[in-house]
Image (tube, grey):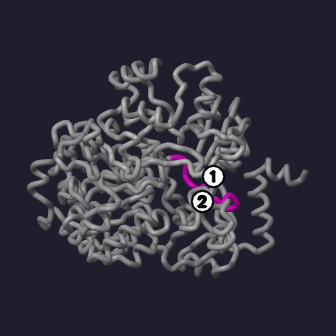
């Protein structure tokens, strides 16, 4: 996030939420937004589903799944054509405005209305409300990123914020709401295939010098393998060993059956976790570890705030925290340099590795209150919002506006991008591109299918489903498939019926809920439940070419009503395929 969560309650004038079901997926952040609304702030929501936040919105745009780029381009177009953009900010602090202006020219509110049925007046109202906000904040999550063109969707949010001067302002900014409590921290610590701590690129000579100085090992300058490409490489025998910890890819990966088949090709598979997850059940070795309440350390939240975590209770059976488990494995392998005595030792090394971001954040300073990076020195207060001087992290003090267009024909995407660059003379190393859908409905799979969360459970349910008051109390419906009323009418399905949701990648069976809050032609389910995991049907191909993220939020599928007898038969088959080890134990 460019800004701090607390600013939403006190400083933001207009909120634009796009691709985020904030109330259910980020309830603490939603609380801060609601406090802002109580103060008088305005709310715009853009989403295929009429979420809880959408019901509170001043403007709600119910767009088709994956149609983020055209709608954002239409808003940008209206703002530019009506001189609502911040001319001084654009001139002083941006590159590429004329390219952007020309690229969005064809994306009018009238065109979007014709293509999607979205009332053009809603787009105009949203554009004007956002542009006139002082300041306006954008929040987004996986409803922007998990598409074939997800990176371009993020660039569009940046374009919108930049032309209105909403970067470098308290209460404004572009704010990706991270999906888990330490996702930002994991990225900052180098849990990505091409970076070291502090987002230092592995191929940078300065990074390699720093690694040799601090760790005493030469660093391979070649970036590693993204998780989304790992299953294919396991099948090909190019990945022979896999070590997973704090992750449950048997449920969270797209087309989960493919991942399950891929791990069978490994020579050795290790999982480190606090529970015997669906992934751990397939491992050769499972390494248990202490959980968050049983260890010391730091978390970095979505707003870049480094916070202390303290041990509340001792772990059972003398279990070690994750960092110590990894150190023990490294020592058994004969590696040197893993003689840390505490989590604080590791944090202090991180501070040395990237002093510009973390150098001033000592344990003493965050004893009671966290500090937002960058914080280069111990007398620095931290940085709640970025780019306040419009120069931080920017080579020449200017941002780059990215001209992004859109086509519904993904086969022409590369050709159209080439034409775009040639038409305006855009250099190859300048950000520009073409968005497109990964799949389009056809006669066999005529429905758009997407996944998400609900407030009772978290991600793959590894922890929350172990909490019985949630599992059997609050979450009374369990796994369900939500369908729009038009789909229900066409197939004679009512709430409470059993349904079989399927496509070329897999199938799940569950009770059906007819949900009028879904856009027509849409099916929605969660990925919390092993017995009905929506990711089984998700598309693992058509990766975003820049981020390698798969289009988890955009697939095509079909659904049919089944009997209770068919439901139990299918559910038994699915569970036995997913959990063969547990099924065998139960039989014994």
Instruction: Give the residue at the far right of this rendering.
Output: 588
Q: Which residues are magenta?
A: 527-541
Q: Is residue 536 magenta?
A: yes
Q: Residues within 10 Å of mark 1 (few under 14, many from 20)?
A: many
Location of residue 142 by image quarter: bottom left
Please, what secondary structure does the residue beneath circle 2 have? loop
Q: Is residue 355 visible?
A: yes
Q: Which residue is mark 2?
A: 527
| 3D distance between C-alphas at marks 1 and 2 | 7 Å
Residue 243: percent from the left, percent from the top? Answer: 62, 35
Query: Is 52 on the left or on the right of 256, as rendered?
Result: left
Viewer-proximal residue, 252 or 391? 391
Residue occupying image coordinates x 31% and y 51% = 155
Between 48 and 15, the one lying in front of the other is 15
Q: Look at mark 1 in the image and give the residue it sits on.
A: 251
Residue at point 64% right, 55% down? 462
Horizontally, residue 432 falls left or right of residue 551, namely left
Q: Position of residue 70 (x, y in %)?
A: 32, 61
Compare marks 1 and 2 and give the one earlier in the sequence: 1
Query: Residue 550 has which mark?
Result: none
What x and y, as percent, mark residue 473?
Answer: 66, 73
Label 1 element class: helix
Vertical position of residue 364 compared to residue 178: above or below? above
The x and y percentages for residue 56 are 38, 78
User: Which of the 4 quarters of the picture holds residue 397?
Assistant: top left
**Is the Cβ of the residue at disc 1 closer than 8 Å to that at disc 2?**
yes
Residue for point 14% across, 65% down: 84
């Amino acid at each position: 996030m460019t800004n701090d969560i607390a600013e939403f309650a006190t400083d933001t004038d207009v909120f634009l939420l796009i691709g985020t079901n904030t109330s259910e997926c980020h309830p603490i952040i939603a609380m801060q937004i609601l406090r802002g609304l109580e103060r008088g702030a305005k709310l715009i929501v853009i989403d295929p589903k009429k979420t809880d936040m959408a019901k509170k919105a001043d403007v709600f745009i119910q767009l088709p799944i994956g149609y983020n780029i055209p709608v954002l381009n239409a808003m940008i177009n209206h703002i530019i054509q009506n001189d609502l953009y911040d001319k001084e900010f654009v001139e002083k602090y941006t590159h590429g405005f004329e390219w952007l202006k020309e690229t969005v020219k064809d994306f009018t509110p009238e065109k979007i209305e014709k293509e999607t049925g979205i009332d053009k007046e809603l787009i105009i109202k949203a554009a004007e409300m956002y542009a006139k906000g002082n300041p306006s904040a954008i929040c987004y999550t996986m409803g922007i990123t998990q598409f074939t063109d997800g990176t371009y969707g993020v660039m569009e949010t940046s374009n919108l914020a930049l032309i209105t001067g909403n970067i470098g302002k308290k209460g404004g900014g572009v704010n990706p709401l991270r999906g888990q409590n330490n996702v930002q921290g994991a990225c900052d610590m180098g849990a990505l295939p091409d970076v070291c701590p502090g987002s230092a690129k592995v191929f940078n000579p300065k990074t390699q010098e720093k690694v040799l100085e601090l760790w005493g090992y030469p660093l391979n300058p070649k970036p590693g393998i993204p998780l989304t490409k790992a299953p294919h490489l396991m099948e090909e025998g190019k990945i022979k060993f896999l070590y997973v910890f704090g992750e449950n890819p048997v449920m969270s990966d797209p087309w989960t059956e493919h991942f399950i088949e891929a791990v069978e090709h490994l020579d050795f598979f290790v999982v480190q976790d606090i529970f015997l997850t669906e992934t751990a059940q397939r491992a050769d070795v499972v390494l248990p570890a202490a959980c968050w309440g049983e260890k010391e350390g730091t978390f970095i939240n979505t707003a870049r705030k480094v916070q202390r975590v303290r041990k509340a209770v001792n772990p059972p059976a003398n279990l070690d925290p994750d960092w110590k488990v990894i150190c023990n494995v490294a020592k058994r392998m004969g590696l040197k340099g893993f003689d840390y005595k505490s989590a604080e030792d590791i944090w202090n090394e991180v501070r040395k590795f990237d002093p510009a971001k973390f150098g001033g954040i000592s344990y003493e300073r965050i004893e009671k209150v966290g500090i937002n990076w960058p914080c280069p020195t111990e007398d620095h207060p931290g940085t709640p919002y970025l780019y306040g001087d419009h120069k931080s992290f920017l080579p020449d003090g200017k941002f780059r506006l990215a001209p992004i267009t859109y086509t519904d024909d993904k086969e022409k995407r590369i050709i159209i991008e080439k034409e775009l660059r040639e038409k305006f003379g855009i250099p190859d190393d300048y950000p520009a591109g073409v968005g497109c859908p990964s799949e389009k409905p056809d006669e066999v799979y005529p429905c758009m299918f997407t996944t998400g969360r609900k407030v009772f459970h978290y991600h793959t349910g590894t922890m929350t489903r172990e909490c019985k008051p949630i599992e059997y109390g609050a979450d009374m419906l369990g796994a369900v498939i939500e369908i729009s009323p038009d789909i229900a009418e066409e197939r004679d399905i009512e709430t409470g019926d059993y349904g079989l949701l399927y496509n070329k990648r897999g199938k799940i069976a569950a009770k059906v809920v007819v949900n009028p809050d879904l856009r027509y032609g849409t099916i929605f389910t969660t990925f919390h439940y092993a017995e009905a995991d929506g990711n089984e049907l998700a598309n693992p191909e058509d990766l975003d070419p820049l981020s390698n993220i798969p289009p988890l939020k955009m697939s095509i599928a079909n659904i049919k009503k089944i009997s209770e007898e068919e439901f139990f038969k299918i559910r038994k088959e699915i569970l036995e395929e997913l959990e063969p080890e547990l099924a065998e134990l139960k039989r014994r």
